[in-house]
Image (tube, grey):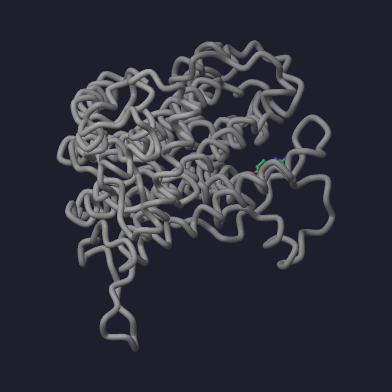
């Protein structure tokens, strides 16, 4: 069914109608479409553009339609062009001529813009909640492992000792920024385009502030052309979600490494692992891999939105119908990933001893050895060079800095004494890293507790 009868002598062919139609993917916005129409009809009644009794009939009819859809008594007609057409048609079917008055001073161009904003506003709230849950799990885990020593890496080479709690809190910061970005995105999303009409506003005495208030928008949009042609909030949301996926993907990649026999720092719960159809010994981190893999489609959704928007003249163009599948897919994918990822992290077993023994190899305390000399007055560059020579000597002798006799130290630099062994002790190396934001267990405990307060009190 098309709304634009009158001018045309023929109807669309079946294939063209299917190509043109968006009801298969925009019907998920039925609640928002009905809410927008109820607000519009109410405003039309209040301003006297239509009679109060007519507005009341429309509102009643729309509420009935909503009830019937929710109860499964009314199904969407796949031959309709879109959800807006379907609901307006159904309304007129039910209440007759009053239904035909609903579209006074409105266009599908501002209608669809309202619907997407309302829909994504709700989804953004759900996404924020899911991220907050993840941050809480991260904070709990960081408290549990606040003093668990592990190797910190650069270039995937053992670099300096840190704590597992500290490593987890790094992800906590990333997800806090994601929450802040989503909250910020919501501010720009929560503006009301209704009343922009097709592109040029209207000659009717509409009240856009009234519909804004009825729909919980902060304000009406300021320019009618922009109101109907703006999809920044879709691109922005998909962009923000792409960054969420970068973070989830990096975290997944690390989990996958930690679960490998080469690392064995962690083990995923059986409920989040899968087996192989041929290799009986396998326990595969499929869920983490799938999260990592899904990052690609969310980036693709963002690129699809940017590309669809980049070359279209103002105002509405049908290209913009492509916004929905892309932004819905980004939202759905991230919701699914967060729903799977958070309990996977919560139930992950950490093999502390394996982390500790990995931290003990690879001369991870070499910087601390150089710092020991520096603290005794040796310039850092000289201390660095001396420690480099000691590492080379250890490699020749097949030992590590802890096992190297004092004479060897003194042969490289006379300032060394027995105190060096304490200075390069791993626990001490970590415990002394008390600089703000550093991995010392006491720091981590405080930061983990703070993180929980920040997320609860919304201090991003
Ligand atoms: N289904 C359309 C969309 O999603 C609704 C707006 C249609 N407006 C128009 N002038 N064709 O973008």
Q: Position of residue 190 (x, y in %)?
A: 51, 22
Which residue is drawn at the image coordinates 33% and 17% (left, top)? 459
Q: Position of residue 61 (x, y in %)?
A: 43, 37
In the image, residue 238 sits, relative to residue 452, either above or below, namely below
Query: Could one spot residue 54 in this view of the protein?
Result: no
In the image, residue 227 sits, relative to residue 115, either above or below, namely above
Which residue is drawn at the image coordinates 81% and 38% (left, top)? 312
Q: Is residue 390 left or right of residue 344?
A: right
Which residue is drawn at the image coordinates 34% and 20% (left, top)? 375
Query: Could one spot residue 340 in this view of the protein?
Result: yes
In the image, residue 445 sits, relative to residue 342, either above or below, namely above
In the figure, residue 315 lies in which quadrant? top right
Q: In which quadrant will I find the C terminus? A: top left
Q: Is residue 153 left or right of residue 27?
A: left
Q: In which quadrant will I find the N terminus? A: bottom right
Q: Is residue 21 left or right of residue 142?
A: right
Which residue is drawn at the image coordinates 67% and 22% (left, top)? 196
In the figure, residue 351 lies in which quadrant? bottom left
Q: Point out the quarter of the image occupied by ligand 1.
A: top right
Q: Position of residue 248 (x, y in %)?
A: 42, 47
């Amino acid at each position: 069914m098309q709304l634009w009868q009158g001018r045309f002598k023929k109807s669309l062919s079946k294939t063209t109608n299917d190509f043109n139609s968006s009801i298969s993917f925009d019907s998920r916005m039925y609640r928002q479409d009905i809410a927008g129409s109820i607000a519009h009809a109410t405003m039309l009644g209040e301003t006297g553009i239509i009679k109060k009794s007519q507005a009341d009939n429309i509102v009643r009819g729309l509420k009935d339609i909503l009830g019937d859809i929710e109860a499964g008594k009314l199904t969407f007609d796949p031959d309709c062009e879109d959800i807006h057409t379907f609901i307006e048609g159904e309304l007129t079917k039910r209440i007759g001529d009053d239904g035909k008055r609903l579209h006074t001073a409105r266009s599908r161009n501002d209608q669809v813009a309202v619907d997407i904003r309302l829909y994504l506003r709700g989804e953004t709230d759900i996404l924020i909640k899911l991220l907050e849950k993840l941050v809480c799990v991260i904070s709990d885990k960081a408290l549990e492992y606040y003093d668990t020593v592990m190797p910190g890496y650069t270039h995937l080479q053992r670099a300096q000792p840190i704590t597992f709690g500290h490593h987890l809190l790094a992800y906590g910061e990333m997800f806090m920024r994601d929450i802040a970005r989503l909250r910020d995105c919501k501010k720009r999303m929560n503006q009301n385009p209704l009343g922009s009409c097709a592109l040029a506003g209207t000659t009717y005495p509409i009240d856009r502030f009234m519909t804004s208030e009825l729909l919980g928008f902060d304000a009406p949009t300021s320019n009618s052309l922009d109101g109907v042609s703006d999809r920044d909030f879709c691109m922005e949301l998909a962009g923000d979600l792409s960054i969420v996926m970068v973070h989830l993907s990096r975290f997944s990649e690390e989990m996958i490494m930690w679960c490998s026999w080469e690392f064995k720092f962690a083990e995923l719960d059986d409920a989040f692992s899968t087996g192989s159809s041929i290799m009986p010994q396998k326990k595969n981190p499929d869920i983490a891999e799938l999260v990592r893999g899904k990052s690609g489609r969310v980036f693709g959704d963002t690129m699809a939105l940017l590309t669809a928007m980049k070359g279209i003249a103002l105002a509405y163009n049908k290209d913009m119908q492509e916004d929905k599948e892309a932004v819905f897919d980004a939202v759905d994918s991230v919701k699914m990933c967060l729903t799977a990822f958070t309990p996977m992290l919560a139930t992950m077993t950490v093999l502390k001893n394996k982390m500790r023994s990995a931290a003990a190899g690879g001369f991870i305390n070499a910087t601390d050895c150089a710092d020991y000399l520096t603290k005794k007055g040796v310039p850092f560059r000289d201390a660095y060079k001396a420690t480099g020579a000691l590492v080379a000597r250890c490699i020749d002798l097949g030992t590590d800095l802890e096992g190297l006799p004092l004479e060897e130290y003194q042969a490289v630099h006379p300032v060394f004494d027995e105190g060096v062994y304490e200075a390069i002790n791993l626990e001490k190396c970590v415990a002394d890293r008390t600089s703000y934001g550093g991995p010392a267990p006491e720091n981590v405990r405080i930061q983990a507790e703070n993180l929980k307060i920040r997320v609860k009190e919304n201090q991003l």
